[in-house]
Amino acid sequence: MLALIIPEGLVCGVDEAGRGPLAGPVVAAAVILDPMRPVDGLNDSKKLSEKKRLALATLIRQNALAWAVAEASVEEIDRLNILQASLLAMQRAVAALTIQPERALIDGNRCPSLLMPSEAIVQGDGKIASIAAASILAKTVRDAGMLALHTHYPEYGFDRHMGYPTAAHRAALEKYGASPVHRKSFGPVARQLSLL
């Protein structure tokens, strides 16, 4: 497996989870790893099994110098658009860190407005250890949130697709209409609402 880069200094990696789903918040995480306490097995969260992600999330929380998770709500996504809401969640995650990083490395091609220098790295979650760690925390926290929403809205099957636009989710949306946690600005949901 490729060894991920660990940058010098107090650098936080930042990533988000949940830009594509039709429901639920977008969640971002910021992580400053401790070079003296490396976490083995870090990778882009999408390339890891759920079991591996959960195990790594625990190790990240135990061994990182600092970590934080934040979100932007469905209402903020609908008001701002998903890109701006994602950047807002990232901004909140970095601001919530207990240690101020010297710089931030952001997964993707856009940086949120931060108090320190930042750099966007396309596919950074597969290249930079701290971004991979952030991707794991963001994904596991968002998945846990979607499982909680499933208990309130079981008919949509959030426990299976986490709000992503699968065939089953689209069919449930057609059958039951949109729930309060659906993103009304997203095409399939907006179309469903226009039919009511």
Image: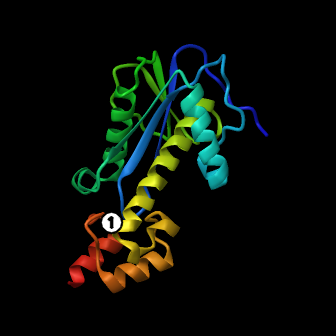
Residue that badge 1 annotates:
186
Q: Quadrant of residue 175?
A: bottom left
Residue shown at the point (41%, 46%) measured from the top left: 27
**Residue 179, image x, y percentages:** 28, 71
Residue shown at the point (31%, 72%) measured from the top left: 189
Relative to 142, is 68 above or below?
Answer: above
**Residue 161, image x, y percentages:** 50, 67
Relative to 48, is 105 above or below?
Answer: above
Q: Residues within 10 Å of mark 1 (few under 14, many from 20)?
A: some
Check the picture and name the quadrant holding the C terminus: bottom left
Number of numbered tags placed on the structure image: 1
> Left or right: where does residue 22 sit relative to residue 107?
left
> Left or right: where does residue 193 sit relative to residue 24?
left
**Residue 173, image x, y percentages:** 36, 78
Q: Quadrant of residue 8?
A: top right
**Looking at this view, is 90 or 80 the one in front?**
90
Residue shown at the point (42%, 41%) measured from the top left: 28
Residue shown at the point (56%, 13%) measured from the top left: 9
Amino acid at pointer 1: Phe
Relative to 192, is 68 above or below?
Answer: above
**Looking at this view, is 151 or 159 the one in front?**
151
Seen as rendered, the residue at the extreme right is 1
Residue 132 in sight from this viewpoint: no
> Left or right: where does residue 40 sit relative to residue 128?
right
Colour scheme of the picture: rainbow
Check the picture and name the quadrant holding the N terminus: top right
Is label 1 in a helix, a strand or a loop?
loop
